[in-house]
Image: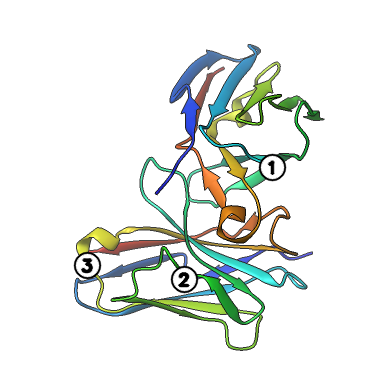
Amino acid sequence: EAGVVQSPRYKIIEKKQPVAFWCNPISGHNTLYWYLQNLGQGPELLIRYENEEAVDDSQLPKDRFSAERLKGVDSTLKIQPAELGDSAVYLCASSSGQGNEQFFGPGTRLTVL
Amino acid sequence: GQQLNQSPQSMFIQEGEDVSMNCTSSSIFNTWLWYKQDPGEGPVLLIALYKAGELTSNGRLTAQFGITRKDSFLNISASIPSDVGIYFCAGQAQGGSQGNLIFGKGTKLSVKP
């Protein structure tokens, strides 16, 4: 069974530029999560989807961050415009339902110059 | 955001030694998960605990769900060099937004051959 797929693995951009990350969850997993992981910290939830519905986006900075999961399968997280403080690892995870074990992708390491 | 108290922050041990780490919270959790993260990769699920007092093993790893439901412990027996990495605990309360995973800051394990 394929795991959670994320791309790109690495991204370097200049501040004020837009950036997008893509995630394809484990087949059959209807719950998808985007996390932010700063250096030396644990992951922190940005947004949680149940199928195509964003059921918890309370931690998503909506002035510059957006996400979508149009068909309830893969998802895209976007930052526009990026700031220096956005440099971090962006992790995607999926589960077969909330309260079930979450499986993580390899992450996208973003560097904003 | 809210995080669990995980200790120790780092450990330097000799190959073959046993390792213990723990996680505490001021809140009650219904689920405790332990993950391992290697450099440049996403967290990998090691053990999941669902009942207070539960003791679960996965090879040389053993984890326990504390009776108070506010703590959890992970033990690694007879450590080997490939145990090197960062270990995260994660707790989950109840449904809704409380059902989201809260992560500790991690315990960085170094093993000397």
Gap between marks 3 and 2 measured at Cα? 19 Å
Q: Amino acid at mark 1?
A: Thr
Label 1: which secondary element: strand
Residue at image point 65% right, 82% down: A72
Q: Chain of mark 3?
A: A
The mark lying in front, picked from 1 and 2, is 1
Q: Position of residue B76 (x, y in %)?
A: 67, 22
As displayed, is residue A23 above or below residue B105?
below
How packed mark 2 is, by other alpha carbons closer than 10 Å (few <14, some 14-19, many 20 or more), is some
Viewer-proximal residue, A56 or B55? A56
Q: Amino acid at mark 2?
A: Pro
Q: Amino acid at mark 3?
A: Glu
Ranked by sequence position, the earlier of labels 3 and 2 is 2
Residue at image point 58% right, 42% down: B90
The mark lying in front, picked from 1 and 3, is 1
Q: Chain of mark 2?
A: A
Gap between marks 1 and 2 measured at Cα? 32 Å
Q: Position of residue B1 (x, y in %)?
A: 39, 49
Residue at image point 21% right, 62% down: A84
Gap between marks 1 and 3 measured at Cα? 35 Å
Left or right: B50 in relation to B36: right
Label 3: which secondary element: loop
Q: Please state the total of marks drawn on the protein image.
A: 3
Quadrant of the rendered structure where residue A27 is? bottom right
Kindly identify which residue carries mark 3. Answer: A83
As displayed, is residue B80 above or below residue B101?
above
Q: Chain of mark 1?
A: B
Residue at image point 75% right, 31% down: B52
Kindly identify which residue carries mark 1. Answer: B31
